[in-house]
Amino acid sequence: MKYELTAAREYDMIALGRACIDLNATEYNRPMEETMTFTKYVGGSPANIAIGGSKLGLKVGFIGKISGDQHGRFIEQYMRGVGIDTSNMVVDKEGHKTGLAFTEIKSPEECSILMYRQEVADLYLAPEEVNEEYIKQAKILLVSGTALSKSPSREAVLKAVSLAKRNDVKVVFELDYRPYSWNSPEETAVYCSLVAEQADVVIGTRDEYDVMEGKEGGKNEDTISHLFNHSPELVVIKHGVEGSYAYTKSGETFRGRAYKTQVLKTFGAGDSYASAFLYALISGKGIETALKYGSASASIVVSQHSSSEAMPTVEEIEQLIAERPVIEAI
């Protein structure tokens, strides 16, 4: 089944939200206390998805606020260098810094992220810095949950979603739950539910939907039953190595399997999944193929050191699908 999008827009996708710095442990298989060197990459879920989409051939734009310093310039230059339109990236004038994420890779099963997210520039994107003329040029507006965690970024997201709906731009909501960004689970549930109910496509892990719903051990059937009473037309729920499910409002269910891979680290999987899934959807490949692309892209990125730099090409994804076995049901 194919997912219909508005044709003939300047951008396939415009992403909104955080763009920050990932500092990934160069010496892995050890705790961070013993790690002396890190490698710098662009990070942040919306930025990673934008980078992944651009590398796959989509025309991508980005809305976000970056620090007025070396880190901010690095982010803008890198994203522009991979083909993303950065004309609506705003430079912070009030001294707010770029968020930093130090990653620890003790083993493929033991990975953690140490975040520096206090008063960061991306959360100071203001509603007046979101441009309707820009958004209306896109087929898809991608927003992620972390941008809802603080004002004024929260209001900027809500404005962007409203503008997208007014201009027949599909809203994709990537739940992107980061507990350290929020004051409480209750606050997370309120604002993520608000945007999920207005979105056309919602993507997240089963655990992220549980947070949004304020419960543990939630069922996919209950999630879609609720969301399909609102705007969503397509809901994607990921279950890690057990694969992912896509549900349509018209009643179809599709299952995607995870691909076997040599895991180096666990972070980056969700962003790579979303970028390839959306690429396939935008390219008219259909939902079943989109699930395969998302799973294949995730398996490539978790086997490599970076997230943004490791985003694969279409050829790499298709080669993996053709050659790599899937993980059977657990």
Image (cartoon, grey):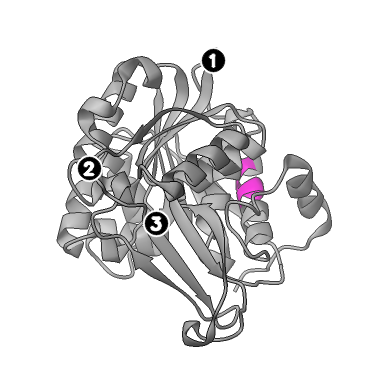
Q: Are marks 2 and 3 in contact (CB under 8 Å)?
A: no
x%, y% of residue 308? 58, 51
Q: Nearer the viewer, mark 1 or mark 2?
A: 2
Q: Secondary structure at mark 2?
A: loop
x%, y% of residue 143? 37, 40
x%, y% of residue 267? 52, 64
Along the viewing direction, whichever of 13 and 31 lies nearer the viewer = 31
* Magenta extent: 290-294
Left or right placement of residue 311 versus residue 157 in this view: right
Q: Which mark is residue 7?
A: 1
Quarter-wise, where is residue 58 in the image?
A: top right
Kind of residue at badge 2 = Glu
Quadrant location of the C terminus? bottom right
Reply above or below: 165 against 27.
above
x%, y% of residue 42? 52, 51
Q: Which mark is residue 220?
A: 3
Kind of residue at badge 1 = Ala
Q: Which mark is residue 233?
A: none
In magenta stretch: residue 22:
no
Q: Secondary structure at mark 1?
A: loop
> Which residue is painted at 17% across and 64% down in the image?
184
Kind of residue at badge 3 = Asn
Q: Secondary structure at mark 3?
A: helix
Q: Nearer the viewer, mark 2 or mark 3?
A: 2
Measure the alpha-carbon separation of dots 2 and 3. Answer: 43 Å
Q: Which mark is residue 94?
A: 2
